Image (cartoon, grey):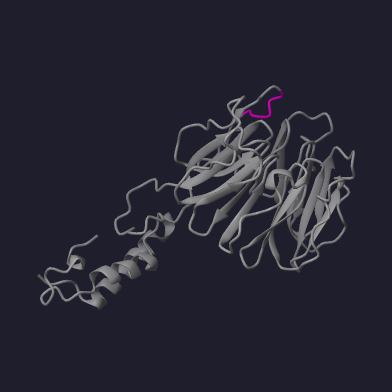
Amino acid sequence: MKRLSYFAILAMAILCFLASAAYAIDQGQVYGWGLNDQGQTTPPAGTDFIAIATGSFHSLAIKSDGWIIGWGWNDEGQAASQAPADFIAVTAGWKHSLALKSDGSIVGWGYNGFGQATPPADTNFVAISAGNHHNLALKSDGSIVAWGSNTSGQIDAPADTNFIAISAGNNHSLALKSDGSIVGWGYDAIGQATPPADTNFVAISAGAAHSLALTSDGSIVGWGYGDSGLTTPPAGTDFIAISAGGTHNLALKSDGSIVAWGGDNYFGQTTPPAGKGFIDIAAKGSHSLALKRLCPYLLTGDVNNDCRFDFLDFAEMTFNWLVDCSLEPLDPACEPR
């Protein structure tokens, strides 16, 4: 019994990598947990979702065919589904929703009592974030536009043009600058809009009355309302994403698993689904969503199950296959795994 040579395996890996590069997509199934009094944690079936968002009592997800699907509380039409229109991002507030299109424009729907569902008409936006009754949008020039309720100055965004990320809490707002520092404004009675002075942050998330930030070393920092451990994140330096809810927080680890903390877990909001393979998280109020990558096809050679056949698979295959089976016929690596 003889195995293919090292060079034959390398040649096949290169050819298959080039042939399958176009199929490297991130889509999957939506999981929900926590408070479900309005059905907000009961997502629709399907394995072709590409983005998710949680409102206070409703949820949204974008499908690979462009549809936005909504579920949960819908008394103001905030969970109404939207026909395909090149959507690339969604965000949700108390009773309103926003979506960002590939042309840089924003669409809004739901409750509009503060004008929060009527976005500006520009077409150069690159990110959006909805609070309770206000919104933030980041423009391609690094400036921020805000609209909606301004009871606590939450839409009085700074005038700089060096921002790279935004996050709207209930009544406060955060923005991350290109130098790694964070700026906060709006309601600050518990310090939720007063971030630490460090300059090593790479991501931010504003919750109901607290805030989180991810540092460049993969650790998490919290500030603001700290009851029930909300602002005491788990130890570790392998986190890659964060999301602050109203009574709990989520963090995504580099291995694709989810960690949750804060609150009393009365609704199960800090009991995320087990396992790995998750690629996105979203928390708001007392419920959460997560997107788990599921390959929509069976791709031969995808030994590490990341929906791609690339050099990572080749490395694993060579580890298993580069055995001289004529000398070691009983070695388990002589059989493909």
Taking the spot 41% from the left edge, 56% from the top edge, the residue there is 306
Q: In this view, does 315 lie above or below 123?
A: below
All told, the count of numbered labels is 0
What x and y, as percent, mark residue 141? Answer: 77, 60
Queried whether the magenta region covers residue 118, the answer comes back as: no
Taking the spot 68% from the left edge, 53% from the top edge, the residue there is 232
Residue 48 visible in image: yes
In the image, is 183 to the left or to the right of 2?
A: right
What x and y, as percent, mark residue 30? Answer: 51, 39
Q: Which of 253 and 108 is in front in this view?
A: 253
Residue 124 visible in image: no
Quadrant including the N terminus: bottom left
Is the magenta region chiefly helix, strand or loop?
Answer: loop
Q: Which of 332 and 58 is in front in this view?
A: 332
Q: Nearer the viewer, residue 116 or 139?
A: 116
Give, as a single range, the part of the protein colored magenta: 76-80
Taking the spot 73% from the left edge, 33% from the top edge, the residue there is 94
Q: In this view, does 124 lie above or below 19?
A: above
Quadrant position of residue 289: top right
In the image, is 161 to the left or to the right of 251?
A: right
What x and y, as percent, mark residue 57? Answer: 66, 30
Quadrant position of residue 282: top right
Quadrant position of residue 182: bottom right
Quadrant including the C terminus: bottom left
What x and y, as percent, mark residue 157? Answer: 86, 52
Q: Specify the farthest residue to the top.
A: 75
Queried whether the magenta region covers residue 77, the answer comes back as: yes
